[in-house]
Amino acid sequence: MRPSETVICGLFGWPVGHSISPEIHNAAFAAAGLDWSYRSFPVRPEELPSAFREFQSRGGRGLNITIPHKVAVIELLDRLEDRARLIGAVNTVLFQDGSASGFNTDGPGFIRAVEEEWGFSFSGKSVVLFGAGGAGRAVAVSAVLEGSRLAITDLDRDRAEGLSGWINREIRPEAAAVFAADTASGERVIAAADLAVDATPLGLDPSDPPAFDPGLLSPAASVVDLVYNPPETPLLRAARRRGLKTLGGLGMLIHQAALSWTIWTGLPAPIEAMRVAALRAMEERRPEEG
């Protein structure tokens, strides 16, 4: 097959230089024997409409969408899957038959990662969520769709209230509530949780404090931090020292990528090849000690 026939996929974001998505997707294309290529495209917010249309006009097959474009891209789509509508954000676009369809694989990627790691069933479980931003919305909507009860806290209480209200109106009445983590009642909410999820940026810097004290959780609870680099954040380290089950964000990253890959190709994703590529990419980008 000539290089001109290579199918192109990519990532739109600003910035995108830190992303390991090209390594993950290109390893999957190679494992499947596909003449496809994935690359990152740094796209400023004001450039999104023109870059999007140009990518489509040149025959691009699929895009991942990351910060700050996950909401703005919706206006450029012809179709929007129901889950993406509920989350209010798109991270995957499929170009097919002259139209652009939007999906959100972040939430399902989170669900699959937790189920794979622990065999965890969300139905009937209590989930506490720290952070109601983009990643938090994806987790919240997907956990409730799976049958969980949800308690949300955010430094911006209005944002937490907005997410809770949206879930209760659009998905299931009284499925989500808001709590203040630094109160006695908030501590009781945390103590009753089966699963605690940190969807805040805390942990990106190894000197960050944990988003909450994992010692408040029951010994049977599990903790997920959506940060994937570093692999063990201060929160996860503190939780592990207390004997709790812990999971970083790499599994979610891999599974959301796998779901995007399948949307574009129509094939089952080679998960293990993607996992190996992700681990290798993280190792190569880890700063040298000393």
Image (tube, helix red, strand yellow):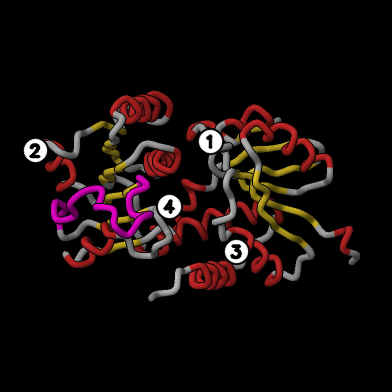
Q: Tell me the distance, in whole angstroms, between the alpha carbons under discs 3 and 2.
A: 43 Å
As helix, strand or loop, the secondary structure at mark 2 comes to helix
The label number, if any, that marks residue 89 in the structure image: 1
Q: How many marks?
A: 4
Residue stretch rendered in magenta on the structure:
199-218
Please say if the residues under marks 1 and 3 sit with CB atoms less than 8 Å apart.
no
Please say if the residues under marks 3 and 2 sit with CB atoms less than 8 Å apart.
no
For the residue marked with disc 3, what is the amino acid? Answer: Ile
Which residue does the image show at 44% across and 52% down from the upper left?
110
- The residue indicated by pointer 3 is 24
Q: What secondary structure do most residues of the magenta stretch adopt?
A: loop
For the residue marked with disc 1, what is the amino acid? Answer: Ala
As helix, strand or loop, the secondary structure at mark 4 comes to helix
- The residue indicated by pointer 2 is 184
Is residue 29 shown above or below 214? below
N-terminal of the pair, mark 2 or mark 1, is 1
**Quadrant hosting residue 95:** top right
Which residue does the image show at 75% across and 70% down from the upper left?
33
- Residue mark closest to the camera, 3 vs 4: 3
Which residue does the image show at 49% across and 53% down from the upper left?
109
**Quadrant hosting residue 215:** bottom left
- The residue indicated by pointer 4 is 111
